[in-house]
Image (cartoon, grey):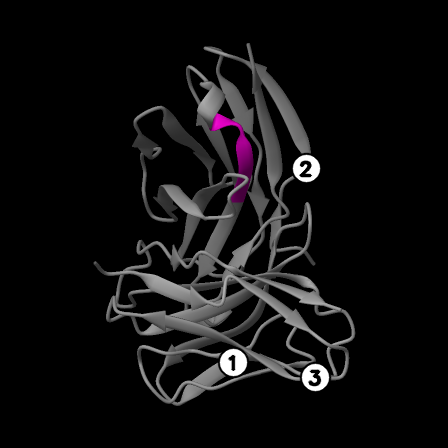
Amino acid sequence: AQKITQTQPGMFVQEKEAVTLDCTYDTSDQSYGLFWYKQPSSGEMIFLIYQGSYDEQNATEGRYSLNFQKARKSANLVISASQLGDSAMYFCAMREGLRGGNKLTFGTGTQLKVEL
Amino acid sequence: DGGITQSPKYLFRKEGQNVTLSCEQNLNHDAMYWYRQDPGQGLRLIYYSQIVNDFQKGDIAEGYSVSREKKESFPLTVTSAQKNPTAFYLCASRATGWGLNTEAFFGQGTRLTVV
């Protein structure tokens, strides 16, 4: 079974608009962490935002926010005021706790294209 | 500057040959990871290590081997048993401890091509 599911292979958004990238996860651990990374065409992986399973508030980092719905096991990334430089591949990842062997598992990614 | 260094950036291998990808970090991180990325695909976990002299198989370990003799180094060998090794390989490390909120830092990647 997939641990991390990203159902949107590609997304388009107009500059200055907000966009939501979906991510659902599966784990039996009570303690886990969720991450979003950005991968430009250069291939580097850039950390964007983190959400802990016990965090009661949604994480925010500048224009990035994480819409965390624990009961639904979803951790969607919201990018506000999109910029052309946001065009990249976006990956959702989960690090499980001890029961999951502390593995760090990634989804298949969403290719975001920001248009004028 | 602290970081993770992968070398080489590009690597060409003949069929049937073993090849080793280097990954070195000076971040004093305990955990290290190797991922494979195919074009337009996500990252798939090959091997990971949480401490020196210990490592675990990931989801696609067949045809690969690793060692962790030093904290700073986690080399990946792509063996001739790996039937389709052409891919982009990423190494990552992260600090470990009681909290889980430590992000992984990545190297720049090695693009391996079988010729």
Residue tagged by mark 3?
Answer: B17
Residue B98 x %, y %: 26, 66
Q: Earlier in the sequence, mark 3 or mark 1?
A: 3
Tell me which chain the residue with mark 2 is part of.
A
Q: Which residue is mark 1?
A: B56
* Disc 3 from disc 1: Cα separation: 24 Å
Pointer 2 and pointer 1 on the same chain: no
Q: Are marks 3 and 1 on the same chain?
A: yes
Q: Quadrant of the C terminus of chain B?
A: bottom right
Q: Residue A113, percent across and down?
A: 59, 24
Asked whether residue B1 appears in the rendered view, the answer is yes
Is B90 positioned to the left or the right of B62 in the image?
left
Which residue carries the number 2 mark? Answer: A7
Q: Quadrant of the N terminus of chain B?
A: bottom left
Residue B99 spot, x, y in % from top left:
27, 60
Q: Residue at x 46, y 18 (%)?
A: A82
Residue at 29% over, 65% down:
B95
Q: Which residues are magenta?
A: A86-91
What is the number of the mark on residue A60? none
Q: Nearer the viewer, residue A86 or B19?
A: B19
